Structures are given as C-alpha cells and as structure tokens.
Image: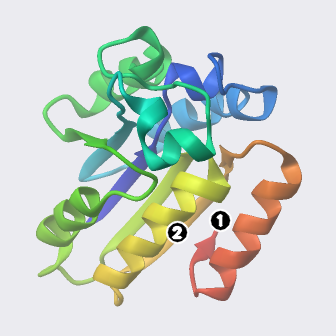
Amino acid sequence: MKVLAVIDMQNDFLTGVLGNAECANTISQVVDVIQNGNYDHIFLTRDTHKENYMETQEGKKLPVPHCIKNTEGWEINADVMAAVKEKYDGKYTIVDKPTFGSVDLAAKLKEICENTYDTEIEFAGVCTGICVISNVLLAKANLYEAQIKVIEKACACVTPDTHRTAIDAMKTCQIDIV
C-alpha cells in the first residue's frame, strides 16, 4: 500500500494572507509528485477555520484570519486539485482539520493501511515546521511500522531555516527524508 498525504496546499498558504515565495514554489513540485507517483490513495488536508478564528487559541497566537471555511483562501490550489482529479479520480479523500495536526487523517491512514504489509506513506505540502511535521508525527505514532517519508523538495515553510529545522527534527524521529 502506497499513500500520499498532501498537507494544506491551500491558497491562503501559497499566495494568500500567509503565502510566501517559498510555499508558492512548491506548487509545481507537488503537482509533479502527484502526476509521476503511483499511489493507491491520496489524502489532502485543508486547514479549516470558522469566522470566529480570532477568538480561538490559535487566532490569539497567530492573529491572521486564514483558511476560513468556504472562502477562496480555504480552497486547495487549483493546479494541485486538477492533477489529483486527473490521475486519481475516486482514489482521493479531502480531510478538513481545525488545527495543525489531524487526528482524523491519522485515523484514516490507520484504517486504510493498518493491515497491509509494506505500507509506505509519503508527505508533501506546507508548512513543514507546523502542519507537515504535526501530521507526519501523528502518522508515525499511529502506524509505527509503516515507512513514513517526507518529500523534501515538495515541502516548504515560512523560511528556508524553519523548513530545515523541521526536516532535521523529523530525521531524528526516524522519518525518511527523500
């Protein structure tokens, strides 16, 4: 079983209110991974907040409203979605998550992969130092015998330094960086 988890490739993180060149540059890399990969299933996460975001704990610590449900910024990048629909129609799942790491994604990964041998789960997306690392570690905790990989060139963070720090932390946790 080979699965790809695409983390938060949403407009707000790429070109919107929290976007930056580092993250925007991953769009073509993620599309390339999707088009050239051979996956049994793809999961895509969507950071999902409500209108009251600024009243939440996260909103108080990161006071930039983003990924408000049903807004353009909340949508997954059109190029990424087009690549998924073209090659994996019927073999993908979108998981909305209210915080950095998704317990729902971890549960869905465990459900689809738990009883398979040679399970491989690859991760791509943004932001490496927040949402990617959170979901990678949840997957590792729930599927500790699965081969968990992060496709480094298809991930980015706020800065190259925060990206590198997250990559090094994941290596320490026995995550394969490819």
Kind of element beneath mark 1? loop
Query: How has the structure been colored for display?
Result: rainbow
Foreground pick, 61 / 35: 61
Kind of element beneath mark 2? strand
Foreground pick, 157 / 85: 157
> Seen in the image, is 15 located left or right of residue 60?
right
Question: Which image quarter: residue 51?
Answer: top left
Q: Position of residue 11 (x, y in %)?
A: 53, 19
Q: As shown in the figure, which amino acid type bears the numbered disc 2? A: Lys
Q: Residue at x 52, y 53 (%)?
A: 131
Q: Position of residue 81 (x, y in %)?
A: 37, 22
Q: What residue is pinned by disc 2?
A: 149
Distance in Å between CA atoms under marks 1 and 2 = 7 Å
Q: Position of residue 93 (x, y in %)?
A: 21, 40
Tally of numbered discs = 2
> Seen in the image, is 57 located left or right of residue 50?
right
Q: As shown in the figure, which amino acid type bears the numbered disc 1? A: Val
- Which quadrant holds the N terminus? bottom left
User: Which residue appears farthest toward the right when viewing the image?
Assistant: 161
Relative to residue 24, is residue 5 depicted above or below? below
Relative to residue 177, is residue 56 depicted above or below? above
Q: Residue at x 61, y 46 (%)?
A: 61
Q: What residue is pinned by disc 1?
A: 178
Relative to residue 31, is residue 134 depicted above or below? below
Q: Residue at x 34, y 41 (%)?
A: 44
> Seen in the image, is 73 located left or right of residue 151?
left
> Seen in the image, is 95 located left or right of residue 14?
left
